Amino acid sequence: MAHGDSERWALLVTLHGRVEQHLAEVLHRRCSLGLSEFRALCDLAETPEGEMRMQDLADAIGLNQSSVSRLAGRLERAELAERFHCTGDRRGVFLGITDAGRERQSRALPIYEAALGEALDEAAASSDAELARLSKRLRPRD
Protein backbone atom coordinates (compact mmCIF):
# COMPACT_ATOMS: atom_id res chain seq x y z
CA MET A 1 0.00 0.00 0.00
CA ALA A 2 1.42 3.38 -0.96
CA HIS A 3 1.84 5.86 1.83
CA GLY A 4 1.61 9.62 1.52
CA ASP A 5 3.79 12.09 3.33
CA SER A 6 1.57 12.21 6.41
CA GLU A 7 1.60 8.44 6.83
CA ARG A 8 5.38 8.24 6.39
CA TRP A 9 5.82 11.12 8.82
CA ALA A 10 3.59 9.35 11.38
CA LEU A 11 5.75 6.23 11.06
CA LEU A 12 8.90 8.26 11.58
CA VAL A 13 7.41 10.00 14.63
CA THR A 14 6.38 6.63 16.08
CA LEU A 15 9.84 5.20 15.54
CA HIS A 16 11.48 8.30 16.98
CA GLY A 17 9.28 8.18 20.08
CA ARG A 18 10.00 4.51 20.75
CA VAL A 19 13.74 4.94 20.28
CA GLU A 20 13.89 8.11 22.41
CA GLN A 21 11.92 6.44 25.22
CA HIS A 22 14.26 3.44 25.25
CA LEU A 23 17.37 5.62 25.18
CA ALA A 24 16.07 7.81 28.01
CA GLU A 25 15.22 4.80 30.18
CA VAL A 26 18.60 3.13 29.66
CA LEU A 27 20.64 6.30 30.21
CA HIS A 28 18.71 7.13 33.36
CA ARG A 29 18.93 3.61 34.78
CA ARG A 30 22.55 2.84 33.89
CA CYS A 31 24.23 6.26 33.82
CA SER A 32 22.04 8.55 35.95
CA LEU A 33 21.80 10.88 32.97
CA GLY A 34 18.86 12.30 31.11
CA LEU A 35 18.88 12.08 27.34
CA SER A 36 19.26 15.86 26.93
CA GLU A 37 22.09 15.92 29.46
CA PHE A 38 23.87 13.15 27.58
CA ARG A 39 23.46 14.91 24.25
CA ALA A 40 24.72 18.17 25.73
CA LEU A 41 27.80 16.42 27.13
CA CYS A 42 28.43 14.81 23.74
CA ASP A 43 28.16 18.14 21.92
CA LEU A 44 30.46 19.83 24.43
CA ALA A 45 32.98 16.97 24.31
CA GLU A 46 33.14 17.16 20.51
CA THR A 47 34.26 20.79 20.45
CA PRO A 48 38.02 21.45 20.53
CA GLU A 49 37.67 23.68 23.62
CA GLY A 50 34.97 21.59 25.30
CA GLU A 51 32.64 24.57 25.42
CA MET A 52 29.75 26.13 23.53
CA ARG A 53 27.64 29.26 23.73
CA MET A 54 24.43 28.40 25.50
CA GLN A 55 22.35 29.45 22.47
CA ASP A 56 24.43 27.25 20.16
CA LEU A 57 23.98 24.32 22.54
CA ALA A 58 20.23 24.96 22.66
CA ASP A 59 20.11 24.87 18.87
CA ALA A 60 22.25 21.73 18.68
CA ILE A 61 20.07 19.68 21.01
CA GLY A 62 16.73 21.19 20.06
CA LEU A 63 15.86 23.02 23.27
CA ASN A 64 14.70 26.55 23.88
CA GLN A 65 16.81 28.99 25.91
CA SER A 66 14.89 28.42 29.13
CA SER A 67 15.19 24.63 28.87
CA VAL A 68 18.90 24.71 28.10
CA SER A 69 19.42 27.01 31.08
CA ARG A 70 17.74 24.46 33.37
CA LEU A 71 19.77 21.68 31.74
CA ALA A 72 22.98 23.66 32.38
CA GLY A 73 21.96 24.04 36.02
CA ARG A 74 21.51 20.27 36.38
CA LEU A 75 24.90 19.63 34.76
CA GLU A 76 26.54 22.21 37.03
CA ARG A 77 24.99 20.72 40.18
CA ALA A 78 26.32 17.32 39.11
CA GLU A 79 29.73 18.96 38.44
CA LEU A 80 29.65 17.74 34.83
CA ALA A 81 29.77 21.22 33.30
CA GLU A 82 30.24 24.85 34.28
CA ARG A 83 28.88 28.13 32.97
CA PHE A 84 31.05 31.16 32.33
CA HIS A 85 30.83 34.50 30.58
CA CYS A 86 32.57 35.34 27.33
CA THR A 87 35.59 37.52 28.05
CA GLY A 88 34.88 39.83 25.11
CA ASP A 89 31.14 40.08 25.67
CA ARG A 90 29.83 39.59 29.21
CA ARG A 91 26.36 38.97 27.79
CA GLY A 92 27.58 35.79 26.09
CA VAL A 93 27.25 32.76 28.34
CA PHE A 94 29.15 29.56 27.62
CA LEU A 95 28.84 26.07 29.03
CA GLY A 96 32.01 24.04 29.35
CA ILE A 97 32.41 20.35 30.08
CA THR A 98 34.42 19.38 33.17
CA ASP A 99 36.78 16.43 33.50
CA ALA A 100 34.02 14.60 35.38
CA GLY A 101 31.64 15.40 32.52
CA ARG A 102 34.07 14.00 29.96
CA GLU A 103 34.45 10.84 32.02
CA ARG A 104 30.68 10.38 32.42
CA GLN A 105 30.09 11.02 28.71
CA SER A 106 32.77 8.55 27.65
CA ARG A 107 31.34 5.88 29.97
CA ALA A 108 27.79 6.54 28.77
CA LEU A 109 28.54 6.60 25.03
CA PRO A 110 28.91 2.82 24.51
CA ILE A 111 25.79 2.26 26.62
CA TYR A 112 23.90 4.77 24.46
CA GLU A 113 25.15 3.13 21.25
CA ALA A 114 24.11 -0.34 22.46
CA ALA A 115 20.69 0.94 23.55
CA LEU A 116 20.20 2.64 20.18
CA GLY A 117 20.99 -0.63 18.41
CA GLU A 118 18.57 -2.50 20.69
CA ALA A 119 15.78 -0.01 20.03
CA LEU A 120 16.27 -0.12 16.26
CA ASP A 121 16.46 -3.92 16.28
CA GLU A 122 13.25 -4.10 18.30
CA ALA A 123 11.50 -1.74 15.89
CA ALA A 124 12.81 -3.76 12.92
CA ALA A 125 11.15 -6.83 14.44
CA SER A 126 7.84 -4.99 14.90
CA SER A 127 4.61 -6.61 13.80
CA ASP A 128 3.91 -3.31 12.00
CA ALA A 129 5.44 -4.10 8.61
CA GLU A 130 5.90 -0.46 7.60
CA LEU A 131 7.60 0.42 10.88
CA ALA A 132 9.84 -2.64 10.58
CA ARG A 133 10.76 -1.71 7.01
CA LEU A 134 11.64 1.88 8.02
CA SER A 135 13.75 0.66 10.94
CA LYS A 136 15.66 -1.75 8.74
CA ARG A 137 16.41 1.00 6.22
CA LEU A 138 17.96 3.09 9.00
CA ARG A 139 20.23 0.27 10.10
CA PRO A 140 21.66 -1.57 7.10
CA ARG A 141 23.60 -4.71 7.89
CA ASP A 142 26.82 -5.69 6.15
Image (spheres, rainbow, N blue to C red):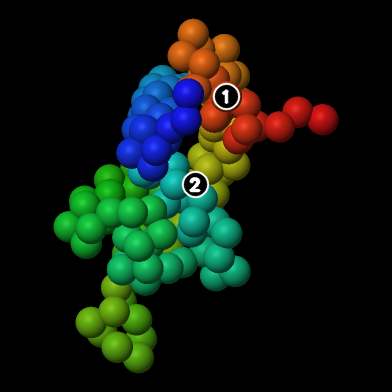
Residue 110 in view: no
Vertical order, 76 against 52 (above or below): above
* Residue at 59%, 42% in the rendered image: 106
Residue 11 versus residue 140: which sits nearer the camera? 11
* Residue at 46%, 66% in the rendered image: 51
Q: CA distance from mark 1 to mark 2?
A: 40 Å
Mark 2 closeness class: few <14, some 14–19, many ≥20 residues within 10 Å: few
**Across the whole image, how many numbered discs are drawn on residues?**
2
Vertical order, 24 against 58 (above or below): above
Q: Secondary structure at mark 2?
A: helix
* Amino acid under disc 2: Ala
Percent position of residue 58, x then y:
32, 60
Q: Secondary structure at mark 1?
A: helix
* Residue at 33%, 39% in the rendered image: 6
Percent position of residue 82, x then y:
36, 60
* Residue at 22%, 62% in the rendered image: 65
Mark 1 closeness class: few <14, some 14–19, many ≥20 residues within 10 Å: some
Q: Give the mark toward the camera: 1 or 2.
A: 1
Quarter of the view holding residue 29: top left
- Outermost residue on the bottom side: it is 88
Residue 26 in view: yes
* Amino acid under disc 1: Arg
Percent position of residue 28, x then y:
39, 26
- Outermost residue on the left side: it is 66
Which residue is label 2 attached to? 100
Vertical order, 110 against 99 (above or below): above
- Outermost residue on the front side: it is 1
Q: Which mark is residue 2?
A: none
* Quadrant for the C terminus in the image: top right
Which residue is label 1 attached to? 133
